[in-house]
């Protein structure tokens, strides 16, 4: 039986507790995708997490999907991230970078007027967050088979740069309707080449990207996030149980650091389906409370538990859970906001509250 405060192996590392900070986009980088010193402080404040997973970071300029999100392509971006990883390490923490290519969930105004790319030319429903406000998604351009190899190489290079910037590992974002899930899902992938059609073909892109990331970081520094049936950004798969069973069966044996599964009111218990199939650390997330996380750990349903908005609003979340303290109120209005301290680095710690 494990508790939140037992150490746990996550790939190459021993995390001192089982509280993982979820990847969260905060849209506080500059227009060139460079994080600021506020970002250094934000992550350093949260270094008591067993593991921090960074906000989604685009591997190449064509992977950008939201205003003021960060990249890991230019020397300026790498240098800024180096400050983040050094600050987290100086406080005794560990941090993986989430690599996030948005594919069709983007807009030409975010891509120097280029058309977003995707497995198939299918326009998602919904709106993009752009410098000119919220505008309808456009019909993306279908990647050629040759171009897919180029995108996979971008993930490989991004992984190299993330490691060079001091990240302890990388997470492949395969959830929330972005490029990898666009390949995986039947509703967004109607290709007739080796990357479309059967489940085996639709999973090929994800598996090849993972192999490329592993080739740079080592398997024990690579994780993957999935959210079956989340249906975010109008992603739909006709046979999600079969799709994710196949994917996880293929991933098993690669020696990956972790499988991160975030569920949001899924009608089906994917944790019960997927955890027994995976051989690395199993990270469970999505709407957890201290009680539900402790229960999942004590029942052996997960190796570690992932908290999003609670970590956003409580830099010292592990300490608060340890002493049973109240949590700060989450301010949704500053989830994505101009890069000031407000709602970013000004959530008080328990110590600050007690000495006020
Ligand atoms: C402000 C915000 C931004 C998010 N951005 C990302 C992201 O960049 N990548 C990702 O995989 N999930 C993202 N998520 C989802 C979280 O990683 C997590 O799965 C979700 O918040 C559920 O956990 P919670 O209920 O503990 O908040 C985001 C969530 C929030 C609240």
Image (tube, rainbow, N blue to C red):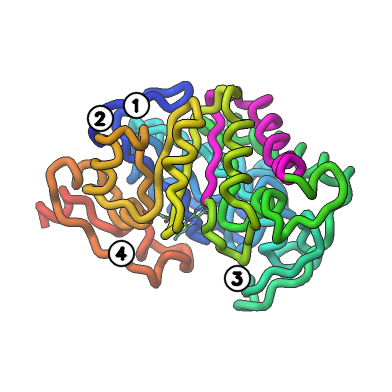
User: Which is more N-terminal, label 2 or label 4?
Assistant: 2
Q: Is residue 121 above or below residue 291?
A: below
Cα–Cα span, label 2 and label 3: 41 Å
Cα–Cα span, label 3 and label 4: 22 Å
Residue 49 shown in magenta: no
Marks 1,2: beta carbons within 8 A: yes
- Front residue of 269 and 56: 269
On screen, residue 265 versus residue 58, left or right, reads left
Name the residue carrying label 3. 129
Q: Nearer the viewer, mark 1 or mark 2?
A: 2
Residue 211 shown in magenta: yes
Q: Which residues are magenta?
A: 199-227
User: Which is more N-terminal, label 4 or label 3?
Assistant: 3
User: Which is more N-terminal, label 2 or label 1?
Assistant: 2
Q: What secondary structure is marked by label 1? A: strand
User: Which is more N-terminal, label 3 or label 2?
Assistant: 2
- Front residue of 68 and 37: 68
Q: Percent x, y for residue 136?
A: 68, 77
On screen, residue 19 versus residue 77, left or right, reads left
Query: What residue is shown at x 57% (from left), y 51% (from top)?
Result: 175
Q: What secondary structure is marked by label 3? A: strand
Q: Is residue 142 above or below residue 351?
A: below
Name the residue carrying label 1. 8
Cα–Cα span, label 3 and label 1: 38 Å
> Could you classify mark 1 by the number of other residues whose Cα lies within 10 Å: few (under 14), some (14-19), or many (20 or more)?
some
Asked whether residue 39 appears in the rendered view, the answer is no
Name the residue carrying label 4. 330
Name the residue carrying label 2. 2
CB at mark 4 closer than 8 A to ligand 1?
A: no
């Amino acid at each position: 039986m494990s508790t939140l405060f037992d150490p746990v192996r996550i790939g190459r590392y021993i995390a001192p507790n089982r509280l993982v900070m979820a990847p969260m986009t905060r849209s506080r980088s500059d227009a060139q995708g460079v994080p600021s010193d506020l970002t250094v402080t934000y992550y350093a404040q949260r270094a008591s997490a067993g593991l921090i997973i960074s906000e989604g970071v685009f591997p190449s300029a064509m992977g950008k999907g939201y205003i003021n999100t960060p990249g890991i392509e230019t020397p300026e971006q790498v240098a800024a991230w180096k400050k983040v990883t050094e600050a987290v390490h100086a406080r005794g923490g560990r941090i993986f970078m989430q690599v996030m290519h948005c594919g069709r969930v983007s807009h030409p105004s975010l891509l120097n007027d280029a058309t977003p790319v995707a497995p198939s030319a299918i326009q998602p429903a919904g709106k993009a967050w752009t410098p000119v406000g919220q505008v309808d998604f456009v019909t993306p351009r279908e990647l050629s088979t040759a171009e897919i190899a180029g995108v996979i190489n971008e993930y490989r290079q991004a992984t190299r740069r993330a490691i060079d910037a001091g990240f302890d590992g990388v997470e492949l974002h395969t959830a929330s309707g972005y490029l990898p899930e666009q390949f995986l899902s039947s509703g967004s992938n109607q290709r007739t080449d080796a990357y479309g059609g059967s489940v085996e073909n639709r999973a090929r892109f994800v598996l090849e990207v993972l192999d490329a990331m592993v080739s740079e970081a080592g398997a024990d520094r690579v994780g993957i996030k999935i959210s079956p049936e989340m249906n975010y950004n109008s992603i739909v798969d006709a046979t999600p149980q079969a799709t994710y069973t196949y994917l996880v069966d293929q991933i098993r044996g690669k020696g990956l650091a972790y499988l991160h599964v975030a569920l949001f009111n899924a009608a089906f218990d994917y944790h019960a389906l997927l955890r027994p199939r995976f051989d690395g650390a199993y990270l469970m997330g999505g709407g957890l409370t201290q009680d539900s996380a402790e229960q999942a750990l004590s029942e052996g349903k997960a190796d570690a538990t992932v908290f999003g908005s609670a970590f956003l609003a409580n830099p010292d979340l592990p300490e608060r859970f340890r002493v049973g303290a109240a949590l700060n109120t989450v301010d949704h209005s500053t989830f994505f906001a101009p890069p000031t301290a407000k709602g970013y680095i000004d959530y008080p710690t328990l110590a600050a509250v007690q000495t006020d």
